[in-house]
Image: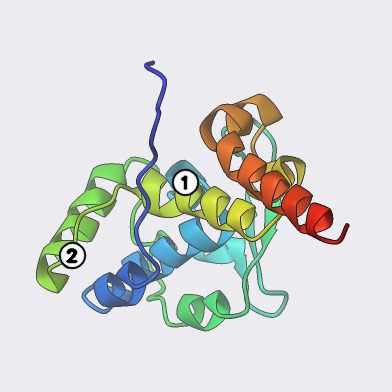
């Protein structure tokens, strides 16, 4: 893989503009990916029984890293999840439905007159970028988003954490 020098993520206004043109399953999926930094593969193939509305959790039997995970869902996501139709798959697509998700997102972007962003861009990349810009450390973001090593985060997003360090150093220096 080539080294990425610039990661594109949607502006915050993209989410409500685009998701209003989506089916409930795709809307909930988009917010799940971006609020929790999960991979598309973590969401696809989830069954309705994996979602526990009483606890506000979603069970993932096996992540890319090979480990099971229970995600404590953002409180704004739980009502969206409760609106999902009860089919075979929680988010409307099985484990091989990535192309369907990309198609649905592309169609919603076209309907909204917005640029298209792929699931990894509006999900994991946006999650990590927002967390780091908010001042959380690479270690914190690694744990929150389920990255296996901090090196991946450092290569892709380390410049964002360094900007926070610089701002902190300048702030402390201003007190002298």
Q: Earlier along the polypeptide chain: callout 1 or callout 2? A: 2
* Residue at 65% in and 43% down: 161
**Outermost residue, top direction?**
1
Q: Is residue 120 left or right of residue 144?
A: left
Q: Is residue 66 above or below residue 117?
A: above
Density class for disc 1 (Cα within 10 Å; few <14, some 14-19, many ≥20) is many
Q: Quadrant of residue 92?
A: bottom left
Q: Residue at x 18, y 66 (%)?
A: 108
Residue 89 or 98: which is nearer the viewer? 98
Comparing 73 with 170, the one in front is 170
The residue drawn where x is 69% and y is 41% is: 142
Vertical order, 150 against 48 (above or below):
above
Residue at the far right in the pictured view = 176
Quarter that holds the N terminus: top left
* Residue bearing mark 2: 114
Reading the image, the residue beneath label 1 is 125
The front one of 63 and 2 is 2
User: Is 101 situated above or below 85?
Assistant: above
> How far apart are labels 1 and 2 at the CA level?
18 Å
Colour scheme: rainbow
Judge left or right: residue 140 versus residue 15.
right
Residue 146 in picture, x, y percent from top left: 66, 42
- Point out residue 35 in the picture as x, y percentages from the top left corner: 54, 63
């Amino acid at each position: 893989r080539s080294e990425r020098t610039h990661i594109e993520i949607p502006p915050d206004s993209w989410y409500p503009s685009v998701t209003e043109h989506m089916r409930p399953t795709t809307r909930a999926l988009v917010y799940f990916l971006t609020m929790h930094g999960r991979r598309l593969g973590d969401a696809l193939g989830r069954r309705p029984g994996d979602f526990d509305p009483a606890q506000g959790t979603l069970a993932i039997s096996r992540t890319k890293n090979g480990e099971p995970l229970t995600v404590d869902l953002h409180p704004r996501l739980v009502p969206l999840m409760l609106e999902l139709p009860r089919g075979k798959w929680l988010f409307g697509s099985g484990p091989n439905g990535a192309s369907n998700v990309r198609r649905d997102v592309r169609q919603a972007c076209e309907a909204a007159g917005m640029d298209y962003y792929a699931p990894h861009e509006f999900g994991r990349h946006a999650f990590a970028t927002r967390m780091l810009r908010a001042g959380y450390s690479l270690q914190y973001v690694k744990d929150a988003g389920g990255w296996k090593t901090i090196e991946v985060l450092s290569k892709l997003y380390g410049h964002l954490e360094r900007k926070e360090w610089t701002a902190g150093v300048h702030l402390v220096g201003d007190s002298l």
